[in-house]
Amino acid sequence: MNDPQPDNPLANILIVDDTPDNLYLLSAMLTEQGYDVRCVINGSAALMGAIADPPDLILLDIRMPQMSGYDVCKQLKASERTRDIPVIFLSALNEVFDKIQAFEVGGVDYITKPFEIREVLVRIKNQLNLQAAKSQIQQLNTELEQRVKERTRELERANLRLLHMASHDALTGLPNRVFFMERLMGVLAYTHTHPDSQFAVLFLDCDDFKMVNDSLGHLAGDQLLKAVARRLLACIHPNYTLARFEGDEFTVLLEQIQSVDEATFLAQAIQHALSQPFLLYQHEVFINTSIGIVLGTVDYQQPEHLLRDADTAMYQAKALGKARYEVFNRDMHTRALTRLQLENDLRRAIERQEFMVFYQPIICLSTGLISSLEALVRWKHPQRGLVRPDHFIPIAETTGLIIPLGLWVLEQSCLQLKSWQEQALQRQEVFDISISVNLSVKQFSQPGLIEYIDQILARVDLDSKILKLEITESAIMDNPKLASELFEQLKLRKIQLSLDDFGTGYSSLSYLHQFPLDILKIDRSFISNLDSLEKNLEVVQAILNLAHHLGMSVVAEGIETQEQLSLLRLLGCELGQGYLFAQPLDAESMETLLLSHPQW
């Protein structure tokens, strides 16, 4: 007889039956099949044996004196040591066998007497195979958990690397603006609890650095910045904080100083160190630096104010002939008055409609066609002419004027896009270009923002799906709860969300998976040296991998060379914008560009 053979010849089976003939028959049959068999004649012995040495399977008679098979099974299932052992009940055909009760107490199958040997073997084999499959699944789950833990550790290590990259300058290795601002904030807080303490901030700007870039090239400029950073480090006390703020600007934070003299001595040492020539590609280069110094006291409330005054002092040094330092004082208040005048002009500019919306195309890198337009506000001042955004946007943010200005930009952009759609329809052309509008921190926290957006879209009759809103990292991190609520409302309207200037703000990776962001914009600082710095290439690749893992598209900002474009395409970046394609254009010039159907 070709009976089913056990998959595991060492499987251990416990038979529980008060009838010796049944024990003998089953034991002999199963032993012959290669099973390791134990036999007991009552429930108590069964429980003791199962607990002492848990079998792989139990054959359990129902009708036994003192303790029925049901009771034995209940106790087996109540014990953590024996609860997973499969139990097959044994029952005579002439017994009232309650199948439902058998399964309710934990039985997995039943066999009727008299035994059909083939049936017994098949049922036993099935249950043992099921147990083996469960064990295999448990093992696979354990292995999977281990892989998940290892992957989590890898992500944590990558997170630490990215966080380091986000807080340090890729070119010089120095702390960057974010790091410096956090440090300055901490020192300022300490000063407010220790009013007698003083500190100082030095703001350094390399004089005529642009001339080096223009004459020797950007690669030489980068090498010069690295050399400047090394010389600065040699001058700086380990307790001071040196950072590359941006471009050719550096900042130094001096903590726990006795007087401003310590800051001026350091400024003199820096200028002496930088007065020696630098050798760049067999060219001797001389570079000077203008330094602004501000003494930090309890009078300051915000770190930005310290940098503002240090910056003011630095520009005063430049105005007095460069290659020198100046300490901020109240005599420099003229600059503040000028700023106040600009603020007053800004208020009137909104009333007089002196603002214009410019547009810069965002290109699909796979097709070379325009995918979207970013709306950028410009101020046409009646006396000053076209005022740069970085001259008036910070003032608008500070004063709250950014809120009405931002809503105006949003409505004008939507109106213009609608006009271009209708013109394309008349020409029987497809116009599938979306509009991207910046949302400032102030606007983000504005009550009724969603209602304003709804009203604008309704007035213009524009499909919300082609509207993209660009936000900064700080807008999210300043109020994560509000951000989550606003995002939910915006996503219901199918408005896409873009994270602007990634890498220049908090760069906290934890929030990227918490919010339903669609697009991540890599800051131009990572793109500008992409074709010359391997580290920048690695950072961009890491950001792309992270964004794609989270289901986000990526826009590379500040593309200026064909080499940068080629590298970004190779890296799998979906979108890009920059002067290589077009600078920001007024509506008329942009319309001309759109009609030419450009492809890069």
Image: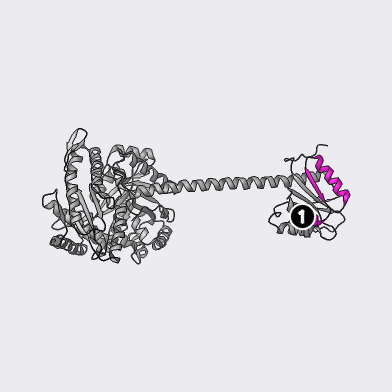
Q: Quadrant of residue 333?
A: bottom left
- Please identify the quadrant where the C terminus is shown: top left
Residue at the spot of label 1? 48
Q: Residue furthest left?
A: 320
Asked whether residue 188 is in view, the answer is: yes
Horizontal and vertical percent position of residue 479: 37, 62
Number of numbered markers: 1
Q: Is residue 126 left or right of residue 194?
A: right
Q: Is residue 34 left or right of residue 217?
A: right
Q: Which residues are magenta?
A: 17-45
Is residue 28 on the magenta stretch? yes
Q: Is residue 280 above or below residue 75?
A: above
Asked whether residue 466 is in view, the answer is: no
Q: Is residue 243 above or below residue 407?
A: above
Horizontal and vertical percent position of residue 204: 20, 50
Q: Quadrant of residue 254?
A: bottom left
- Label 1 secondary element: helix
Q: Is residue 83 left or right of residue 448?
A: right
Between residue 522 and residue 10, name the one nearer to us: 10
Q: Residue at x 84, y 61 (%)?
A: 66
- Please identify the quadrant where the N terminus is shown: top right
Q: Is residue 39 left or right of residue 483?
A: right
Q: Residue furthest top?
A: 282
Q: Residues within 10 Å of mark 1 (few under 14, many from 20)?
A: few
